[in-house]
């Protein structure tokens, strides 16, 4: 029998480790389930994804401000938000092989999907991680690791509004870690227990929420073009009544066609006045907005856009991965690429390394670049293709004569000659977000 061809996911996991995108957490101890560490290239890609989102939400718009709230919050927040009571999944255990499943993801009538054994009755399992604040481990000192970043935004609604003098409609954006004790994490970094969210809550006048919901659905779908994701791999999925989260009146997911099937990468939710009303009730603070135009006071409605950084990183890896006869290429948008340019001396003599190092030093002030003088130029190109570096600059014998270098484009593999003094200008517009 021939050797089985590895799946696309296997190839991505292997490339991610080999080239320093993603490692298993605590690997030297055998790893810990569903926890991952981002390596030198992974952290660059992650930061670039976050910056692209932040730029489009906060810098390019005058109606959205950013915050960075703390992960640990007052425990009453999670009572008000409904997470203590409602953020649960039904859990079943196999009595034979002891494996655990989410009852809503399997056909429980058929028994255990692994061994066919009898399953326990479903019991509701809260997904929030619990810990204690301070040295005393009792109920009075319980705090939770936030399961979504959104609540840090709601409790700061008035702080942001007052300090920035914003009027409705306006939004608050945040990027930060969230934690969920998922019953079935998996598919590499797709579903993990610790992950990073990019969430934006847009506060609007009640009655205008449906219009804004449509607006944000479109805006967010279009944004994926900037992330470089192929249109045919994206679609909307509307939540049915039985899928809606406890806070939502309407919800659409943006789904991506992963090798393991269409799956959610972003949620757009009409959260109505649910969260602010509940915080008003639980905190006893007036969270209404005074509308100067109409003279009314009301609790704003909220349209939320919520996506996961890790999930988008996996999406960009899957979508960019291209196998060509002679090479593997990650065809990231140049501004997402971890390394923007690689600099090679054609040979290790005749002063070429010195010129190449000088170019490297100059570019390093602006971008993440990489110097490489080992192996043939062809092999050096292949190594950069595999990590998605959009441009490779080679110093050759002509450089010694006229000061020009070749710049090779990752996707077309075409080379052009430009003056070494013009490299920064060439790269600037192409590789910055
Ligand atoms: N505040 C709303 C909210 O959290 P969600 O649909 O539960 O909504 C939003 O999550 C996004 O967060 C998802 O579309 C996904 O990108 C990311 N996400 C949620 N759970 C995740 C997990 N366990 N691992 C990785 N990303 C996750």
Image (spheres, rainbow, N blue to C red):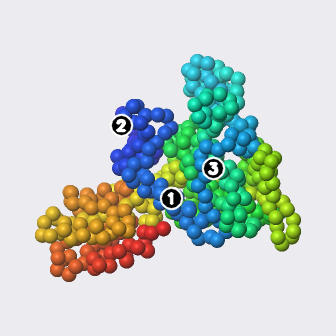
Whole-number angstrom distance, CA of label 3 to CA of label 2: 48 Å
Question: Which residue was labeled with disc 3?
Answer: 149
Q: Residue at x 60, y 40 (%)?
A: 145
Q: Nearer the viewer, mark 1 or mark 2?
A: 1
Residue drawn 82% across the image and 64% down it: 290
* Among numbered discs 3 and 1, the one appearing first in the sequence: 1
- Ligand 1 within 8 Å of disc 3? The answer is yes
Q: Quadrant of residue 368?
A: bottom left
Q: Looking at the picture, how far across and down is residue 380, in whole percent?
A: 26, 59
Quarter where residue 77 is shown = top right
The residue sitting at the bottom extreme is 402
> Element type at marker 1?
helix
Instruction: Give neighbour class at mark 1: few <14, some 14-19, many 20+ (Cα, 10 Å).
Output: many
43 vs 121, left or right, is: left
Q: Name the image quarter holding residue 426.
A: bottom left
- What residue would you read off at disc 1? 49
For discs 3 and 1, the disc positioned in front in the rendered view: 3
Question: Quadrant where the N terminus lies?
Answer: top left
Tell me the distance, in whole angstroms, between the alpha carbons under discs 3 and 1: 18 Å
Q: Which residue is mark 2?
A: 2
Residue 69 % position (x, y): 61, 52
Disc 3 to disc 1: CB gap under 8 Å: no
Frontmost residue, 219 versus 178: 178
Percent across and percent down for residue 75 are 69, 40
């Amino acid at each position: 029998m021939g050797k089985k061809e590895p799946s696309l996911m296997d190839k991505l996991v292997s490339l991610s480790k080999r080239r320093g995108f993603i490692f298993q957490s605590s690997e030297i101890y055998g790893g810990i389930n569903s926890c991952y560490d981002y390596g030198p290239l992974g952290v660059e890609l992650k930061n670039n994804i976050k910056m692209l989102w932040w730029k489009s939400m906060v810098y390019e718009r005058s109606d959205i401000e950013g915050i960075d709230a703390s992960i640990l919050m007052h425990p009453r927040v999670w009572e008000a938000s409904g997470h203590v009571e409602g953020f649960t999944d039904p859990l079943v255990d196999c009595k034979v092989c002891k494996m655990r499943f989410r009852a809503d993801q399997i056909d429980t009538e058929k028994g255990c999907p692994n061994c066919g054994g009898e399953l326990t009755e479903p019991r509701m399992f809260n997904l929030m991680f619990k810990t204690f604040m301070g040295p005393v481990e009792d109920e009075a000192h319980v705090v939770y690791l936030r399961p979504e970043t959104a609540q840090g935004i709601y409790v700061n609604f008035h702080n942001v509004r007052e300090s920035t003098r914003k009027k409705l409609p306006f939004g608050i954006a945040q990027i930060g870690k969230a934690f969920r004790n998922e019953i079935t994490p998996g598919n590499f970094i797709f579903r993990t227990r610790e992950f990073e969210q990019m969430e934006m809550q847009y506060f609007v006048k009640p009655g205008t929420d449906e219009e804004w919901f449509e607006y944000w659905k479109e805006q967010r779908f279009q944004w994926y073009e900037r992330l470089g994701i192929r249109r045919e791999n994206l679609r909307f999925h509307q939540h049915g009544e039985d899928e809606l989260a406890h806070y939502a009146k309407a919800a659409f997911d943006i789904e991506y066609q992963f090798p393991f099937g269409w799956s959610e990468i972003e949620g757009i939710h009409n959260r109505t006045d649910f969260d602010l009303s509940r915080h008003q009730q639980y905190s006893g603070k007036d969270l209404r907005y005074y509308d100067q135009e109409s003279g009314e006071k009301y609790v704003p409605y909220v349209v939320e856009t919520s996506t996961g950084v890790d999930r988008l990183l996996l999406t960009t890896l899957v979508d960019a991965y291209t196998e060509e006869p002679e090479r593997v290429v990650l065809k990231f948008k140049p501004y997402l690429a971890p390394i923007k340019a690689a600099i090679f001396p054609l040979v290790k003599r005749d002063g070429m390394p010195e010129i190449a190092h000088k170019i490297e030093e100059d570019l390093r002030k602006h971008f993440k670049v990489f110097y490489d003088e080992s192996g043939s130029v062809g092999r050096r190109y292949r190594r950069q293709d595999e990590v998605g570096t959009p441009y490779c600059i080679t110093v050759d014998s002509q450089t010694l004569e006229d000061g020009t270098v070749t710049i090779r484009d990752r996707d077309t593999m075409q080379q052009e000659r430009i003056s070494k003094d013009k490299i920064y200008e060439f790269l600037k517009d192409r590789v910055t977000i």
